[in-house]
Amino acid sequence: MRIDAVDFFYYAMPEILDVGDGSQDLLLVRVQAGEWVGWGECEASPLVSIASLVAPMSHSACKPVRDSVLGQRLDGPEDILRIGTLVREQSLDQLQADHTYSGIDMAMWDLLGQQRGEPVWRLLGFTEAHPKLPYASVLFGETPAETEAKARAIRADGYRAAKFGWMHYGRGTVAEDAAHVEAARAGLGPDGMVMIDAGTVWGDDLAAARERLPALIAAGVTWLEEPFVGGAIDAYAALARESGPVKIAGGEGAHTFWMAKHLIDHGGIGYVQIDAGRIGGITQAKRVADHARERGCTYVNHTFTSHLALSASLQPFAGHAEDLICEYPLEPRDLAVRLTRNHLRPDADGLLRIPDGPGLGMQLDLDAVAPYLVDVEIRVKGKTLYRTPQR
Amino acid sequence: MRIDAVDFFYYAMPEILDVGDGSQDLLLVRVQAGEWVGWGECEASPLVSIASLVAPMSHSACKPVRDSVLGQRLDGPEDILRIGTLVREQSLDQLQADHTYSGIDMAMWDLLGQQRGEPVWRLLGFTEAHPKLPYASVLFGETPAETEAKARAIRADGYRAAKFGWMHYGRGTVAEDAAHVEAARAGLGPDGMVMIDAGTVWGDDLAAARERLPALIAAGVTWLEEPFVGGAIDAYAALARESGPVKIAGGEGAHTFWMAKHLIDHGGIGYVQIDAGRIGGITQAKRVADHARERGCTYVNHTFTSHLALSASLQPFAGHAEDLICEYPLEPRDLAVRLTRNHLRPDADGLLRIPDGPGLGMQLDLDAVAPYLVDVEIRVKGKTLYRTPQR
């Protein structure tokens, strides 16, 4: 097969709120080769990624991502690896390229799976897809009482694990933060897994993070996520040495295998959280999952949007029984819900099964999201480089 | 002052060749505050950075770069620091943002310098700007004879140092590569500084890089640049342990202070090469320069475009006498030459003086580059988010 077309579709909710909810828009990717079609999703700024797909060449290492994909042979996983290497070489100086390419990589895996009638995880070399324990991923409440109520509702829904993030955490006093953490524990019950997401709030300020440790330890928190910006590896390592039973988690911002590797090898994190929609797709995410396994670091997906993205994000560690838990976006917007006809729901035992169908196992419903399609046109020197495809 | 306007101007040569020459296009940035104007330049894909400036918000940590700059107070260096932090927080998930913001940071320093009648290096806290020894930065020839002729011509022009890069280096045989290195040395003479740029050609393949070391050592090469992709820190460290008198150089791809810091602290590089047009501007470049000084690593600018970019790239280490050499693009295209009325030329002693005039000390000539202005229009939901400003 040869890749005949790569199309990007930008969808957005009518109103985008200034909150930490990444499901308000999405960038859907379609790859076509002969009669076969595959779908993927970038976890990225849609307009910037569209520009990165089509931007005029600046020089030999700053080409549009499309140029390294269109017309390429796609007969097996080795072609996906080859195309990824080509993109990284030819778009080396185009910073956005890793985000842009992530959805293309997913779509190629999906396409290959469709064509072979195999789930992607099998193409990745796994013989079995182990069920995952989904943790509900939500924002803190405005007040501790609201946080506790959220946790209680999650537990009532059958979840045994939940992550609370952002909002005011880390920005107020240590006592206020502690009250929210205690509330999360109280609501989820003594045997639930509670995770806390600081969303890089402390930059590289070790002291600010350290002050929050006693409350996290007292509440039996499983991990503290992103205390620092992704690059602050020395701060990560220092905090990990002091955090005792509370593991440090991070990695969602990694846009290369290397960034994740450094966090694992030098940053001392206990959980590496990879967004397959940012790191270069399923291929690079799988490299991280394998490396993490070797180093005794637990791999977890980072996913905030649709169940297409969720399925793609589960493939890289589908065969690793030890990497038990998975992120499960609990409050996605209507757009992210409607994108797929089928959804990945926890079974009665509370576990999530990774689709066994061909490719990523998801059926899209473009009619349902049609009202959310964003009309974009990019013109350079009077020539239209991009216009939103109608289908 | 308040920032009233941020404008991006995309210029390009009529034909962009598929070669490693970054001076074929440029992205000029203008910042206005009251009656004052400052200019900067992103070393970035112009269209992608324009999109990043104006892209609709996806969520609270994925906003257009413009939103964190427009309307902000700009009364002193502390405001530039504050605005940079805001951009990194509010555009955390917009990968391109570091490249996009780099030119804005430069323009704000330029503006502040204009307003205060001070060169930027003085605003950065330096009391003196030490002259730099420029090295001519060129591509290898197609043949060793051509490389030698280039080196000879450079020497005849008065340069005592030259860097040869890319083309076929690292892609052919070890013997072919050695012939080019020997030719460079022969042409530049026994006392010239010869640097070799591998342009990440070996990915993270330590063995491939190691094979080239004997020829580099024999030719008395000062540094081997970018043997590996920027993330392959362990490979950098391993090669640095084996390279003896030949230092390893890298860092041009760093788009955060942290990436450069890791290359210095953990990658064992002897020269850190920072592109102020990528790493977040003069502010972040200065952080690297200061950190490098503490660690005994030599700071060098990475610059491939205009003398506006060159002046900006020299400010962060202007006051460091120990960081003697500087990159000096020798073969820029007409566009990059015409952008400024004045140019930074080595004096009779072969040394380059950093401008003493206010701001970056460069006078732009927009009339001269007007024929190269690229017309861009970005429309989203029927609304024009960006159109090339006419002035």
Image (cartoon, coloured by chain):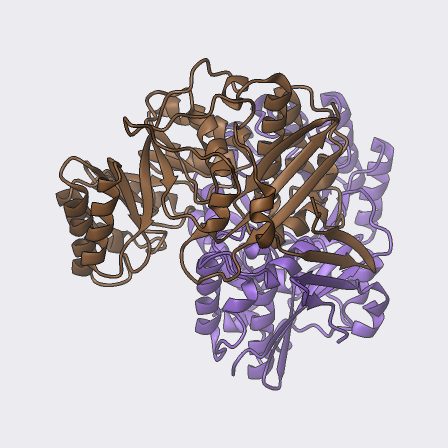
Chain colours: A brown, B purple
Left or right of A257 in this view: A150: left
Residue A297 appears in the figure:
yes
Q: Please state the horizontal and vertical placement of residue B379, each as a whole percent of the image.
A: 69, 62
Above or below, A356 relative to A27? above
How many marks the image carries: the answer is 0
For residue A188, which quarter of the picture?
top left
| In the displayed structure image, the side of residue B374 where residue A345 appears, left or right | left
Image location of residue B390, percent across then percent down: 77, 74
Rendered image quadrant of residue B204: top right
Q: Which residue is drawn at 78% across and 58% down?
A: A380
Coordinates of residue A30 in the picture (x, y in percent)? 65, 37
Image x and y of residue B286, in percent: 50, 60
Residue B252 located left or right of residue B16: left
Quadrant in the picture for the C terminus of chain B = bottom right
Judge whether residue B194 can be spotted in this image: no
Above or below, comparing residue B172 to residue A149 in the picture: above
- Residue at 62% x, 40% y: name it: A29
In-image side of A237 versus B54 (left or right): left
Residue at (54, 58) in percent of width and height: B280
Going 52% across and 77% down the picture, which residue do you hit?
A: B71
